[in-house]
Amino acid sequence: MNLHVVSPWSIVGLVCAGLITYIVAVYLHERDASRWKARAIVIALGFAGAVASFIGSYSASSKLDHLTAPRTIDDASRASLVSELAKYPGVVFDVSSANDPESIELLNVIESVLVTAGWKEQGFSANPIILQRPGQPNAGIIASSGVEIDLPVTHRYDWASAATTLGKGLTQAGLQGVAVHYDPGDRGQALHLRVGYKPQR
C-alpha cells in the first residue's frame, strides 16, 4: 500500500510528546539539572512520540487496506463451498451485480462455485435493465451493498437449506454483509444471488 494516512492517533501522539517534553525540560531547568540529562530525556520522549505516531499511521493504513482491498474467496473456501452445495443439485438461480469491476469479479467467483456444485443458472429477466456478459447468462444490475440470497416463496422450503448453506459458507469465507431471506411476493422459479458493492465498514 503506497498511501500514507495520517491518523488522529498520530497527531495525539505528537502533541502529547511535545507537551511532556516541554514540562520535563522546564522542571529540570528549574532544578538546575545537568544539561546532558535534560537532553537525554527530551530525546527519549521525542522517540516515544514518533513511535506513537507510527503506530497510529499503521493502524489507519491497515483499516484503509481492509476497506479498499477487493473481496475474493480463496481456493480452500471455494472447494469447501462446492462440496457443501453439491448436496443440493439442481437449484435454479439467476444473478445480479453492482455495476463495478470489484462486484462483478466477486460475482464471477461465486457463480463459478454454484455451477461447479451442480446448480443451474438461468439468465436474469426480472426487468429490462441487464448486464450483458459475453458467453454468460445476462445479469441484473443493483445498487445495494453486500451479498443477498433471495428465495422465491415458491421454493421457500425445499431450497431453504441450500440457501442457508450458501450464506453460511460465504460468511465463513470472509465476506461481510451476507443476508439470506425470502420474498413472499416472488413466485418465480429461481433463487436470486445479488452481489452488491463492498460494505464500507
Image: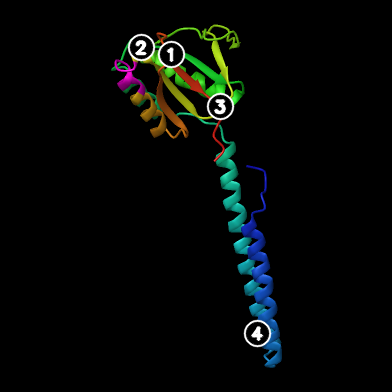
The residue pinned by badge 4 equals: 37
The residue pinned by badge 3 equals: 144
Kind of residue at badge 1: Asp
Side of 169 where 100 appears, left or right: right
Earlier in the chain: of badge 3 and badge 1, it is: 3
Q: In 3D space, how far apart are the residues under numbered discs 1 and 4 (Cα atoms)?
A: 78 Å
Other residues around mark 4 within 10 Å, as few (<14) / some (14–19) / many (≥20): few
Side of 41 where 77 appears, left or right: left
Residue closest to the eye, 92 or 173:
92
| Above or below, 81 relative to 91 | below
Kind of residue at badge 3: Ser
Residue closest to the eye, 188 or 113:
188
- What residue do we see at 59% from left, 8% from top? 128
Cβ atoms under marks 1 and 2 closer than 8 Å: yes
Query: Start and end of the magenta stretch?
Result: 156-163
- What residue do we see at 65% from left, 84% from top? 37
The residue pinned by badge 2 equals: 154
Q: Is residue 74 visible?
A: no
| Above or below, 3 relative to 103 | below
Q: In 3D space, how far apart are the residues under numbered discs 3 and 1 (Cα atoms)?
A: 19 Å
Mark whose residue sits in front, 4 or 2: 2
Provide the secondary structure element on which disc 2 rests.
helix
The residue pinned by badge 1 equals: 186
Q: Is residue 145 visible?
A: yes
Earlier in the chain: of badge 1 and badge 2, it is: 2
Q: In 3D space, how far apart are the residues under numbered discs 2 and 3 (Cα atoms)?
A: 24 Å
Q: Quadrant of the N terminus?
A: top right
Image spot of residue 178 (x, y percent): 44, 30
Other residues around mark 2 within 10 Å, as few (<14) / some (14–19) / many (≥20): some
